[in-house]
Amino acid sequence: MANLKLTDVAKTYGGTVDVLKNINLDIEQGELIVFVGPSGCGKSTLLRMIAGLEKITGGTLEIDGQIVNDVPPAQRGIAMVFQSYALYPHMTVRDNMSFALKIAKKSPEEIDAAVTRAAKMLQLDPYLDRLPKALSGGQRQRVAIGRSIVRDPKVYLFDEPLSNLDAALRVATRIEIAQLKEQMPNSTMIYVTHDQVEAMTLASRIVVLANKGIAQVGSPLELYERPNSEFVAQFIGSPSMNLLAGEVVGTGELTTVKLTGGGTAVSHYPTTEADMGLQVNVGVRPEDFVETGGDFIFEGKVNITEALGEVTLLYFEPQHGDDPVIGKLPGIHADLRGKSVKLGATPDKVHLFAGGTSLLYR
């Protein structure tokens, strides 16, 4: 198993089009790192550069202290699981999983032991003699993962492995990947996804990519609770964090902001007297809003309600040029549609941003 170090890694096409630049990242042995970001941000490109399928045009990639920029993919000790299963349709599950070992001229005993071990971990024992066409999508993806496990690589790379599965299979396979990681605690895994639930539930750390670089790196809870920018705050979490314009009117350990819409927010973000009058955006996640009859951060008319059983989403009519505000209240609140509702939040749930950057990271 291995650690990776990316130093000033860049990717340029045609010498003029920058896709990624100044990527600096240390990945420790045993971590499960998840790359997330908007479409086109370079998640899969970065993964493919690590695999050796894309050429690194700047910087260095080290695996266990060795620079591997010019090392062929087959010699990097990396196994990749693709979005498509890429199984040989004419081969059984056993033959698909053992193919790479046969090419490497491993002994029949070694091959059988490796396939048996991987099949047991992935609960594929009953399917070893079946062809891929006789398997469900989730079972085929497990075979693709098993094909990687038998090689005992230094690093596992997953490129959106669950995107071809339906909702129920995604949940089941995600749980299986989490259990697999527990069985292989020393394995280093890098996982690309656009699904926030996968990122939040699987990752040791999340790498948020944007604007050709890294926007923030941290544990799932760190990114959720302490985003360093408006972009990260709105990208992590669903529905996105609400942003409301306001002005700082009170400073100190607790900061008071008067909002454009007439409400008042108190935040645990500390400020100084120099921040008086500072124009800020107040960020509150929909799930952190509570209905209040007293002091409020936001007051508006509920345009649409979505009752999801355990919670109800409230969509408010846009006002003052802001994006529509969304609240998420526990229980069923379909009766609030068309009514004016006041929402508040405790100071520890109120984020402050100036110039797109969190005041915590100044």
Image (cartoon, grey):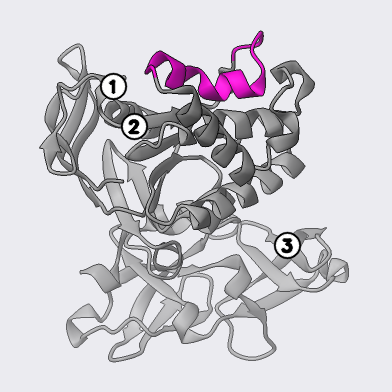
Looking at the rendered structure, the secondary structure element under dot 1 is: helix
Q: Which residue is mark 1?
A: 73
Does the magenta segment cover residue 344?
no
Q: Residue at x 48, y 36 (%)?
A: 149
The correct choice, above or below, for 275 with respect to 23 in the image is: below
Q: Distance between the Cα atoms at labels 3 and 1?
A: 47 Å
Given residues 350 and 223, the one toward you in this image is: 223
The correct choice, above or below, for 224 with respect to 293 in the image is: above
Task: Locate residue 75 relative to residue 149 in the image: left or right.
Answer: left
Say which label, 3 or 1, has the lower sequence index: 1
- Residue type at mark 1 is Pro
Residue 50 picture location, percent across and down: 28, 31
Looking at the rendered structure, the secondary structure element under dot 3 is: strand
- Residue type at mark 2 is Ile
Q: Residue at x 66, y 27 (%)?
A: 140
Give the numbered dot on residue 78.
Answer: 2
Q: Residue at x 28, y 71 (%)?
A: 359
**Whether label 2 touches label 1, CB < 8 Å:** yes
Residue 100 picture location, percent across and down: 44, 19
Number of callouts? 3
Magenta highlight range: 88-105
